[in-house]
Image (cartoon, rainbow, N blue to C red):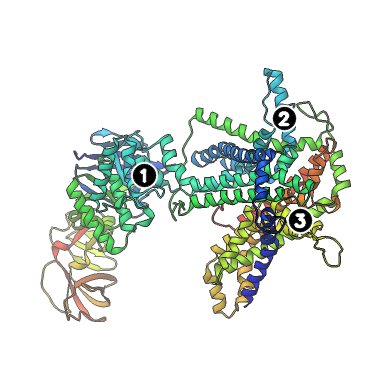
Amino acid sequence: MQAVRVEARNIQLAYGTTPVLRDITLAIEPGEFFAILGPSGSGKSTLLRLIAGFNRHQAGELLVGGKDVTGIVPWKRNVGMVFQNYALWPHMTVARNVAFGLEERRLPRDEIRRRTEAALELVGLAGYGDRRPGQLSGGQQQRVALARTLAIEPQVLLLDEPLSNLDARLRLQMRQELLALHRRLGLTTIFVTHDQEEAMTICDRIAVMDHGVIQQVGTPVELFDEPANRFVAGFVGSVNLFEGELRAGDLFVSPTLGECRLPAGLAARPPGPACLAFRPHAVRLDAAGAGGGDGLGFDGTIAAAAFQGDSVRYEVRVAGASVIVEQPHRRRDIGWREGTAVRLRIASDELRLIAA
Amino acid sequence: MILVAVALAIAAFLAVFLAAPVASVFHAAFASGAGGFTLAHFESFLQISLMRESFWNSLWVAGLSVVFASLIAVPLAYFTVRFRFRGALLIQTLGVLPLIMPPFVGAVAMQLLFGRSGSVNLLLNDAFGFAIPFMDGLNGVIFVESLHYFPFILLNLVVSLRNIDGAMEESAQNLGASGWRLFRRIIFPLALPGYVAGASLVFVKVFDDLGTPLVLGTTNMLAPQAYLRITSVGIEDPIGYVISVVMVTFSVAALWASARLLKGRDFATLQRGGTSLQRRELSPGQQIAAYGWVGLVLLLVLSPHLGILLMSLSRVWSFSVLPEGFTLAHYATVFAQSKGMIVNTLVYCGAAALIDVVLGAAIAYLILRTRLPGRQLLDLAASSALAIPGVVLAIGYLRAFRGLELPFMQTAFTASALALVMAYAVRRLPYALRSCMAVLAQLHVSLEEAAENLGASKARTVRRIVVPLMAGGILAGFVTSFITAAVELSATIVLSSSASQAPMSYGIYLYMQSIAGRGPGAALGVIAVVIVGVGTYASHWLLERRSAPLARPIA
C-alpha cells in the first residue's frame, strides 16, 4: 500500500463564534509517524476529527494523498481512526468488530475472514475472535480497536490519545508496539496526545498546538533544543524561564534574576523584552566560590532538594529568582543539603533567548 | 435483630397478600375434587372452543399491540434523539400523556371518534364513501392499547439511545457504515435493551388488561373470560383459575424471556465525560415530512383525551362528527352522585401508596445496605407482583380469603375496602421499590459511615441521614404508586362489591355501561385524568428537584 501525504492549508474552524482552529497549515509526509501535541482544549482532537471527517472547517483546504477531502463524508474517506475509549461495540464479538469495516465494503466472505484473522494476528490477538469486548483487558481492547481500524487498510491511521486509558506499564509496552507496527506497515500515522514524553519517544515529528494555533513543528530534538516560543519551551520538557529586557552590549536585565552579561552571539536580536531560558539538567552545581568556565554563572542557595531516584531536583534561590536544577544521582552521592551556598553555571550552548 | 424482624414482617406481608392468593389460584386450577393433582381442568379448558379462541385472541392482541406501539414509538424516539428537532422535549413529554389516562376511559371516547359511526368514519364516508373498521372487535382493543402503552417503549428507548457513546457511531462511520445500515447494525442493537424492556412490558400489560376489552364489549379474550367465569359461573368454577394460571404463565414467560435476552447486555456505553450521539440537521424537505408525521401521531395519541373531554361536556353525541351542544351538567351529576368515589380513590390509593413506600424503602435498605442472607429474595418476591395480572390477584383474594371476616366489623374481608387497598399495595409495590432502590443506590455509603463515625447508631443514621436523603425518591415512589393504583381497573372490578365503597375507576366503568351514563362517566374520567396528571407532574417535579442525575427507564 502506498503511504499518502496529509496536508492542511490555512484551515479555520469555529464552533459558533468560538474559534477552535486558527489558520492551521501543516504537511505530514507519507509514512511519517506524526504527533499532534497540546494541552486539552488546544484543538488537537478537533484537527484529528477534521481529518476523519467528523468536523467541518469553514475555510482552507485539507488534502489527503493530494486530493481535497472537504465535503467527503466520514464513511467514504478510508481514514482509519482509533478512538480514545476504543468504541468497541459491546453487542458484537471481537471478530465481528474487526470484520465490520470489511463487511461494509462488501468484500467476499472468505476475504473478510482472512483479513480479520490477519488483523487480529497482527496485534497479537489471534484466537480471541469469539470473545466479547467486555471480556478483554484494557490493553487487549486497545489492540482490538487497532486491528479493527487496520483491517480496512486505511490510507492514514489516526490515533486519538490511544494510550491514555492504559496503566503506566502497559502504556510503555503499547508505545513500543505501536512503533513496531508503524515500522512494519509504513502507514502515515497521526497521533494526538497531551503527553510530551509519549510524543517525543515514538514520533518522527511533532506539531505543538495551543489555542487552536500550531506553535511549532519539528523533530523531538528540534522542539526540545530550539523551542520557538515560551509555550513550546515550557510544554516540551521543563525549563527555567526568566522574563527580562535585553539591552545594548548583550546585557540581560531581569527583575528577579538580576543583571547578567550574555555570552557573545546569543543575543542575535535588537534590544527589547525577551526571556532567558535553560533546562534544569543544563545547570552545573559547584561549591560556592568555584570559578571559571564559559556561559553564565550565578551564586545561589539550595532551598529544597527532592530525590527522584535517577536524579535529584533542587530548587535554588538566586537573587529574587528560583532556579530548578536537576543533577544525575550516583550511588552514595549525598548531594547538596538545604541551605548550602552553591555556584551555578550554565554553558553557553545551553542558553536560549526567546521572544517574550 | 431489628433487621431480621423487619425482613420477616415484609416476608409475611408478601406471603399473605401475594404468595397465598396466587398459590390458591394455582391450587384450584390443579386440584381434583378429591384434593389430588389433576390436569382435567386444563383439558376441559382446551375443549371449550371459546377458551381456545380467547387464548389466541389475547396473544394476537398483545402481539399486534407491541407491533403498532413500536411503529409509533421507535421513529418518535429515534427522530427526537437523533436530529436537531425543534420541540423534541415537547414531543417526548406529549408522548407520555397517554399513560396518565386509564385506557378503558379513553376506549369509549375512541369509539365515538373512530368507531363505525364515529367522527372519523363519518367524515371518511362523506368524502370518499368508505369507512375503516378501527374499532371493530379485536381491532378496537389493539388500537386503544397500542395508543395507550407505546410510551413504555418510547421512554425506555429514548434512555437507551441517549446512553450510546457518540464514538460508537463515529467509529462505524469511520469504517464505512452510514444511513440505514448504521442504524440497523450499530444504533438499534445498542438500544435494543431499552426496546426489549419496553416491548415486553407492553406485551404483558396488554395481555393482562381487563378494563379495555370489557368496556369495548370484547369478551372473547382471556382476562374478560376469567372475570366473567368467576363472577357469573361462580367462585368454585375451575376454568376461571385455569385461565388465571395461563395468564400468569404467559406474563412470567414474557418477562423471563426479555430478562434472558438482556442478560449481560448492559450496553450503556456512554462514559463519564463522553459525548452522546451527535444531533444532525434535517433538510427542509425532511423537516416537513418529520413534523407532519409527528403531528399526525400526536393527534392520534391525544385523541382519547380530546374525546373524553368532549364527551364530558356534550349534551348529545352520536352519529355526528362533533357533539350537538355543550353542558356542564355531567360534572354536576358526578359531584352529586359520586363524590364518595373520588374520596374513596384518594383514601385507598393513599393508603396503598403509603404501604408501598414503607415496604419499598425497607426492602431497598435491606438489599443495598445489609448482608442479611436471602435479602435478594425479598426483591424478587416484591418485583414478581409485576407478573401477576390484577384479575388473577383479585381472584386469588376471593379464593384465599373467602369466609374470612374482619374482626369487630361483621363484614367479609373480600367485601371490604381493605382487600382493595392490599391488592393495590401489592400490585404497585414494584414501582415504589424501584424508586427507592434508585435513590438509595446513588447515596454513597460514606455519608452514613460519617454519621456513625460521629456517634449515631444505625437506627439514628437511618432516621437522620438515609430517610431525609431518600425523601425525593420515596415521594416519587408514593406518587407513582398512587396514580397507577388510581387507574387500576382489573382488580377493582373483581373486588368492588358495592358502589358506596368503590373507587372512581369502578365508577367510570359503571357509568360507561349505559348510554345515558356516558356523559357523567366521561366527566369522572376527566377528573381522574386531572388527578393523575397533577400527580405525574408532581412526581416529575420532585425528582427534578432532587436532581436525580440519571433518567430512569420505566418498568
Residue B203 to residue B436: above or below:
above
| Along the line of sight, the residue nearer the viewer: B290 or B480 | B480
The CA span between labels 1 and 2 is: 50 Å
Q: Chain of mark 3?
A: B
Q: Chain of mark 2?
A: B
Q: Which residue is mark 2?
A: B115
**Can you tell which of label 3 and label 1 is closer to the viewer?**
3
Quarter occupied by residue B149: top right
Residue B134, position as x, y percentages in the image: 67, 30
> Which mark identifies residue B398?
3
Q: Which residue is mark 1?
A: B171
| Along the line of sight, the residue nearer the viewer: A273 or A8 | A8
Specify whether A18 is left or right of A295.
right
Q: Quadrant of the N terminus of chain B?
A: bottom right
Query: Of the residues shown, which amino acid type is indicated by label 1?
Result: Ser
Query: Of the residues shown, which amino acid type is indicated by label 3?
Result: Leu
> Residue at horizontal 63%, vertical 60%?
B382
